[in-house]
Amino acid sequence: MAAKTPRKNRPFDFTRIVVPKQTDRRFYGHGIPGVDAQKLHGKLIVVEGCDGSGRSTQIQKLTDWLESAGHATTQMGLKRSTLVSEELNLAQNGNTLSHTTMSLFYATDFADQLENVIFPGLKAGRILLADRYIYTLMARDLARGSDMGWLQNLYGMALIPDVVFYLDVSAEERVQRNFAKDFALDYWESGMDLGLSREMFDSFLKYQAMVEKEFKKLHKTYGFTIIDGNRSPDETFDELRTKTESVLAGT
Ligand SMILES: Nc1ncnc2c1ncn2[C@@H]1O[C@H](COP(=O)(O)OP(=O)(O)OP(=O)(O)O)[C@@H](O)[C@H]1O
Ligand SMILES: [Mg+2]
C-alpha cells in the first residue's frame, strides 16, 4: 500500500471535500430526443473566455484539484469530436466554407460531443469540465452577423450547465499571452476572414473586441459567473476553486 502523503506536503487543502448535490437539470430548448436530463447526475462546469484567457491553465488546475479530492472528471472542448474535428480543421485550412456552413460544422462537432462525451460522463456521475461551450460558438457567429433566434434554436439541444465561469482578461494581456505561447497570432483568432484589417495584430484587437461585446450580451441572457483572469494563475484559481465548491454543494 502506498504511504500516506503528510498533510503539509499535499498540493491542496482537503479539509473541505464536497459531496456533489443533485440539482434540477434542463436543456435550453428541445434537447436531444430520448435523453432524460434528470438521469444526468454529474456536474457540468463550463469555463468560457476569449482566446488566450487562460482556460486550459485553469481547467488543468481544476482537474488536478478535483481528482486529488476523489472526484472523477472528464474534459471536453470544441473541435474535439472524433466525428468531424479532422474535417473541420481541413475546412478551416481551405478557408472555403461560408459562415453558416462553418457554424453548422461546429454545431455538429458540439452535438457529437454532447452525446458521446457529456451525457455518458454525467450519467456516470462524473464532473464534466468544458473548455468553452455554446457561448463561444454563438459569440463568434453573432460577430459574423448570425441571427440570435436561429442560434438559440440550433443550440436548444444543449444542456444547461451547473455553472459558466467566464474568464475576463483584457485583449492586450491576451495578445501578450498568445505571443508568449505561440510566438504568433492565429488566423481565425484574429478574425482575418472578416477583412477587418490587413495587419494581423490590428485585426486581432478589432475582432476580439467584437467577440467580447457579444459575450457581454450573452452574459445578460445566460448569466455567467465572471472571474477576473488578469491575475496570476494561482490567484485566479483560488477564486475558481471556492466558487466550484459552492456549485458542488448546490449553494
Ligand atoms: N493568469 C495568467 N497569467 C499569465 N499567463 C498566463 C495566465 N494563465 C495562462 N497564462 C499563459 O498564457 C498562455 C495562454 O493560456 P492558456 O493556454 O491557458 O489559455 P487558453 O484560454 O486555453 O488559450 P486558447 O484560447 O489558445 O486555448 C499560456 O502560455 C499560459 O501559460
Ligand atoms: Mg486552451
Image (cartoon, rainbow, N blue to C red):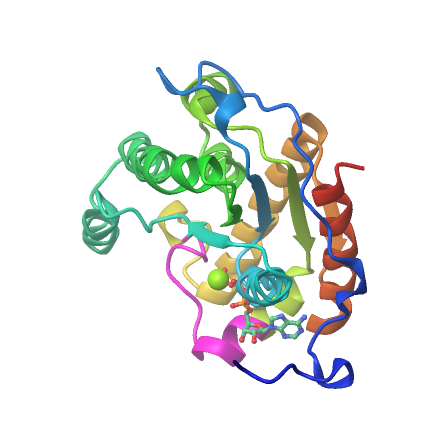
Does 28 appear in magenta? no
Q: Residue at x 69, y 71 (%)?
A: 233
**Is 164 on the left or on the right of 238, as rendered?**
left
Q: Residue at x 27, y 32 (%)?
A: 101
- The location of residue 156, given as percent across then percent down, is 47, 20
Does 181 appear in magenta? yes
Q: Which residues are magenta?
A: 177-191
In this view, which residue lies farthest toward the front?
A: 1
> How would you classify the magenta stretch by its main secondary structure?
loop
Can residue 230 be seen from the camera position used here? no
Quadrant of the picture in which ligand 1 is shown? bottom right
Can residue 3 be seen from the camera position used here? yes
Q: Residue at x 59, y 35 (%)?
A: 161
Location of residue 222 (image quadrant) = top right
Q: Residue at x 56, y 21 (%)?
A: 26
- Numbered-mark total: 0
**Is 250 on the left or on the right of 118, as rendered?**
right
Location of residue 13 (image quadrant) = bottom right
Q: Is residue 19 shown above or below 62?
A: above
- The location of residue 29, given as percent across then percent down, is 50, 16
> Which of 186/247 is in front?
247
Q: Is residue 107 shown above or below 199?
A: above
> Which of 172/164 is in front?
164
Q: Is residue 237 shown above or below 165?
A: below
**Is 38 on the left or on the right of 32, as rendered?**
right
**On-image quarter of the C terminus:** top right
- The location of residue 210, given as percent across then percent down, is 57, 44
> Which of 2/29 is in front?
2
Q: Is residue 191 shown above or below 199?
A: above
- The location of residue 20, given as percent across then percent down, is 67, 42
